[in-house]
Image (spheres, grey):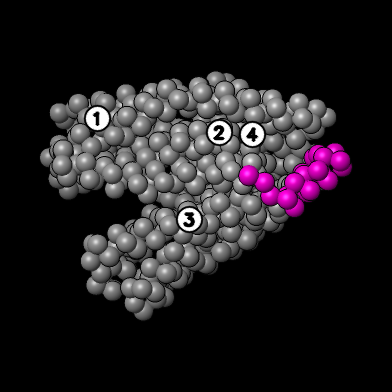
Amino acid sequence: MTALHTPPDRAEAARRAVSMIFLVNGAFFATWAVNIPGLRDALTLSEAQIGVALLAIGLGALISMPLTGGWTARHGSGPVTRVAVVACMLSLALPFLMPGYVGVVLALTVLGAANGSLDVAMNAQGVTVEQALKRPVLSRLHAYFSLGGVLGAGLGTLLVGRVPMLTHVLLVVGVTTLAGLLAGRLLLPDPPATDLPATKRSDQRAAEAQPSRRRAGISSAALLLGLLCFLGMLSEGANYDWAALYFRDVLGQAGGSAGVGYTAFVITMTLGRWFGDRARGRLGDEAIVRVGAAVTALGLGLALLAQGPAFAAFGFALSGLGLSNVVPVLYGAAGHALAGRGIAQVATIGYGGFLLGPTLIGFVAQHAGLRSALGVALAGAVLVALLGGGAFALVRQRAAAAQVQSPGSEGAAPSQNVP
C-alpha cells in the first residue's frame, strides 16, 4: 500500500498522527526556550556563551537536514519520522544532564541535529498525507506546531520555579516521546519509487548506484524555493526575536506592554496556519506565497512607521498573518515537485534565515537603529513577493517534465498544490 492507494480512513488517521508529531515538536521547542534562563543560572553562563550554545542548535540542524533528505528518499518519510521524533524528544534532556558548558554545547548540537532531521522528515510525511487525502494539510500541520509551542510555554509557566528544572524537562520528554511512538505507528509508507513502473524503478536504482554531478547538485527550482524560504524565515525570525525589543526600545513600552507586538504576531501566525489550507485550496500556492509576502511587507511597514503601540501591534499582526503560510507552502511545493530531497534542500537553505537573520538585524541595529534594521525583514518580504512567480514557474516546469518522462506514473503531485 502506498500513499496514493490509501483508504480514506487510513489517510485521515495518518493526518492526525503527523499532526501530533508537529504538536510535540512545538512543545519540545517551547520547553527548551522557557528553561534557557534556568540552565544559564545553573552553569553561570554569560550572554555570549548562551549565544554560542544557541548557534550550536542551528549548526546541528544544518548538518542533519541534507542527510535526512537522502534517508527519506531511500527509506521513506514514515520510518525516518518515527526514528527522528523519538531521537528529537529524548535529546531534549541532554543539555540539562551535562555538568559543564562544553557538554551543553555538544548536547545542543545533537539536539539541533535531531530536530533538523525531524523537521525534514515530518514535512515530507505531511506531503505524503496531502497526496493520500488529495487536499492541502501542511498549513494546518504547522499550526499544530504553533499550538504545541503555546501548550509547552503554558506548562512551563506553571512549572518553572515550582519544580526542579530537570523534573520539568523529563516530564515533557516522557510524555512527548510516548506520544511520538504512538503517532509513528499510524504514519503512511512512501518508499522511494513505489509508484513507478518496474523498468523505471530499475533505472532509478541504477542511477542511485552511479552518483552523477546532476544528482549531487541542486536544481534551480530547489535553489529558488530555498532562497524564498530563507527570506521568509528571516522575516519570521525578525518578528519573533525583535518585536518585543522594538516595542521596548523604540516605542518606549515597558514591562508586559513590550510583548504586545510579539503576541499579536504569534496569534495571527497561528490562526493563519490553522485556516491556511482552505485558502490554499481556493487561491493556489503561488498566490498564498506572493500575497502573503506582500501583506507581511505592508504590516512591517506600518509597524515601522507607527508612533504608538496600537498601530504597531496591528502592523505586527498583519505581518504574522502574511507570513503564516509562506514556509509551509514552500515546503509543500518542494515536496510535491522534488520529493524528500527537495524538502531537505529547501529547508537547509531556509534555515539559514533563522541563523543569519537575527544576527544581521542585530548588526544593522547597532549601527543604524532597530527601526532601520527591521527594514531588512521588510525587504526580504518584498523579494519573496517579487520572486515567487519565477519560483513556482520552475516548479510547474519540473512537474510537467516529470509527467512527460513517466506518463503512466501515478506519483504526480496533486494539481491544486502546484497551480
Q: Residue furthest left?
A: 252
Indicate which disc, 1 or 4, sits on the residue closer to the N terminus.
1
Indicate which disc, 4 or 2, sits on the residue closer to the N terminus.
2
Indicate which disc, 2 or 1, sits on the residue closer to the N terminus.
2
Q: Which region of the structure is painted magenta?
A: 193-213
68 relative to 282, above or below:
below
Q: Which residue is at a point 38% across and 68% down the rendered structure image?
A: 105
The label on residue 220 is 2
- The local secondary structure at tag 2 comes to helix
Residue 179: % across, % down: 59, 59
**Residue type (three-letter) at the residue carrying disc 4:** Ala
Callout 1 touching callout 4 (CB < 8 Å): no
For the residues labelled 1 and 4, the Cα–Cα distance comes to: 36 Å
In the picture, measured across the screen, residue 394 lies left or right of residue 388, that is: right
Which residue in the protein does label 3 denote? Answer: 61
Question: 344 or 208: nearer the eye?
Answer: 208
Q: Which residue is at a point 39% across and 61% down the rendered structure image?
A: 56
Which residue in the protein does label 4 denote? Answer: 337
Residue 280: % across, % down: 55, 26
**Residue type (three-letter) at the residue carrying disc 1:** Ala
The label on residue 303 is 1
**Residue type (three-letter) at the residue carrying disc 2:** Ser
Indicate which disc, 1 or 3, sits on the residue closer to the N terminus.
3
96 relative to 244, above or below:
below
Q: How many marks?
A: 4
Which of label 2 and label 3 is nearer to you? 2
Indicate which disc, 3 or 4, sits on the residue closer to the N terminus.
3
**Residue type (three-letter) at the residue carrying disc 3:** Ala
- The local secondary structure at tag 3 comes to helix
Dot 2: within a 10 Å radius of its alpha carbon, few (fewer than 14), some, or many (20 or more) residues? few
The quadrant of the picture occupied by the C terminus is top right
